[in-house]
Image (tube, rainbow, N blue to C red):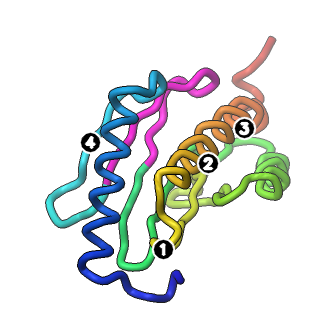
Amino acid sequence: MADRVASDDEFAAAEALIDAWLERQLADNPTVAALDRGEPGEFRWYLRLRGEEKEVFTIWWTLGQRTLHYETYMMPAPEENQAEVYELLLRRNAKVFGAAFNIGDEDAVYLAGQLALGQLDEGELDRILGTLWEWVERTFRPAMRLGYASRFVG
């Protein structure tokens, strides 16, 4: 359950699982460009990915006492056609499993979600990575073309 605080052993096991899984991704997954770990005691990882539509992006993984939070920055605040951009994102939210597009600081667009620690396993980490990669790739170009339409002339 997401409302139950993980025991010290459960938390340590979750941290070890994430560490090992991310290291394997770095070694075996050609879309993974780099992996960094946050400051000691921060329980945060940064996984830099290569994309096709969006050249590179980073997923931040943050381990908390109850959940694993994950997010990626997709684009800056749209300069034009804001209503159309937000409509596109809201419609896509209906299809994204385990994450949602949202507006963050400075009205930038993020894709984020969280998972209860009790559900954490390698299959879920694979699903999260695949979901974020797929939906950034599917959404980045259409959202940018709407949000910065005058820059895409011709």
The disc placed on residue 37 is none
Q: Residue furthest left?
A: 40
Give SS at disc 2: loop
User: Is 147 placed above or below 54 here?
Assistant: below
Percent from the top left, x then y, of residue 152? 74, 20
Majority secondary structure of magenta residues: strand
**Residue at 54% in and 51% down:** 123
Q: Which of disc 3 and disc 2 is earlier in sequence?
A: 2
* Contact, mark 4 vs mark 2 (Cβ under 8 Å): no
Amino acid type, label 1: Gly
Query: Separation of disc 4 and disc 2 at Cα?
Result: 26 Å
Amino acid type, label 3: Thr
Q: Which of disc 1 and disc 3 is earlier in sequence?
A: 1
Quadrant containing the C terminus is: top right
Query: Separation of disc 3 and disc 1 at Cα?
Result: 30 Å
Residue 12 horizontal side relative to residue 31, left or right: left
Can residue 55 be seen from the camera position used here?
Answer: yes
Disc 3: which residue: 139
Magenta highlight range? 45-59
Amino acid type, label 4: Asp
Residue 50 lies in the magenta stretch: yes
Q: Which of disc 2 and disc 1 is earlier in sequence?
A: 2
Give SS at disc 3: helix
Amino acid type, label 2: Ala
Disc 1: which residue: 118
Q: Which of disc 2 and disc 4 is earlier in sequence?
A: 4
Query: Separation of disc 2 and disc 3 at Cα?
Result: 14 Å
The disc placed on residue 36 is 4
**Residue at 47% in and 51% down:** 122
Query: Separation of disc 1 and disc 2 at Cα?
Result: 35 Å
Query: Separation of disc 3 and disc 4 at Cα?
Result: 26 Å
Residue 69 lies in the magenta stretch: no
